[in-house]
Image: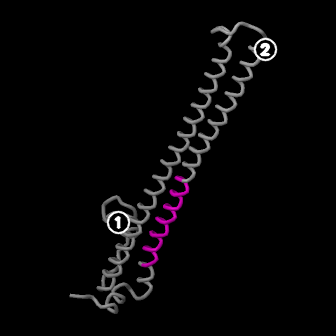
């Protein structure tokens, strides 16, 4: 048996009930889309953090190569014999530069992963808001339908459906 639009509107307590149900649904969709946009922004920012860390690591290695070349030139200009002992400062410069570059990349990846995790939480929050609005909408529709049958409309806050729930005042 199909329910006509007029009968449904009447069962919902008029157009106000329909607007309330529609508003709850639209609010849920709006919150979900807002969360999706925030998550997309966080993912973009995460990618930017990775790229920034890679670029900074490249600059560190470029500066390391420059310092190593300067150390080699200074050693050669001093007239010292060029052996493994003369290479020690160069090797230390190289090692420190590689360590700095690796730590910069690691730090960027950690920040990016944190932002991706935040994006996932934002999306989950949006889904939860949508589902909550769907349940609110269903509750409002059911309350309007029960109220239209001549019985008082029960709401979650005015009549708890389990003992000890919100609004429960005893028997």
State the CA–CA distance, disc 2 to disc 1: 89 Å
Magenta span: chief secondary structure? helix
**Viewer-nearest residue: 90 or 146:** 90
Which quadrant of the structure image shows residue 49?
top right
- Dot 2 falls on a residue whose secondary structure is helix
Task: Tell me which residue sits at (37%, 68%) in the image.
Answer: 156
Q: Which residue is mark 2?
A: 77
Q: Residue 43: image x %, image y %?
A: 52, 52
Q: Which residues are magenta?
A: 22-43
Q: Residue 116: image x %, image y %?
A: 49, 48
**Viewer-nearest residue: 12 or 73:** 73
- Give the quadrant of the C terminus: bottom left
Task: Tell me which residue sits at (49%, 61%) in the image.
Answer: 36
Question: Relative to 36, is 98 above or below?
Answer: above
Give the left or right position of residue 169, taking residue 102 as reference: left
Q: Residue 90: image x %, image y %?
A: 67, 18
Queried whether the magenta region covers residue 47, the answer comes back as no
- Dot 1 falls on a residue whose secondary structure is loop
Q: Residue 144: image x %, image y %?
A: 35, 81
Question: Relative to 95, is 59 above or below?
Answer: below
Which quadrant of the structure image shows residue 29?
bottom left
Q: Residues within 10 Å of mark 1 (few under 14, many from 20)?
A: some
Q: Which residue is mark 1?
A: 160
């Amino acid at each position: 048996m199909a329910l006509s639009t007029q009968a449904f509107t009447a069962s919902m307590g008029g157009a106000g009930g329909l607007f309330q149900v529609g508003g709850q649904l639209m609010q849920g969709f709006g919150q979900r889309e807002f969360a999706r946009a925030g998550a997309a922004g966080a993912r973009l920012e995460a990618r930017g953090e990775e790229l920034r860390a890679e670029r900074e690591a490249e600059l560190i290695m470029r500066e390391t190569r420059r310092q190593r070349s300067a150390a080699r030139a200074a050693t050669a200009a001093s007239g010292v014999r060029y052996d493994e002992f003369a290479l020690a400062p160069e090797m230390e410069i190289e090692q420190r530069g590689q360590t700095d570059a690796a730590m910069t990349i690691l730090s960027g990846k950690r920040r990016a992963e944190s932002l991706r995790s935040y994006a996932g939480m934002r999306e989950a929050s949006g889904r939860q808001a949508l589902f909550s609005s769907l349940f609110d909408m269903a509750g409002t529709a059911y309350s309007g339908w029960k109220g239209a049958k001549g019985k008082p409309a029960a709401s979650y806050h005015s009549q708890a459906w389990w003992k000890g729930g919100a609004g429960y005042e005893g028997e």
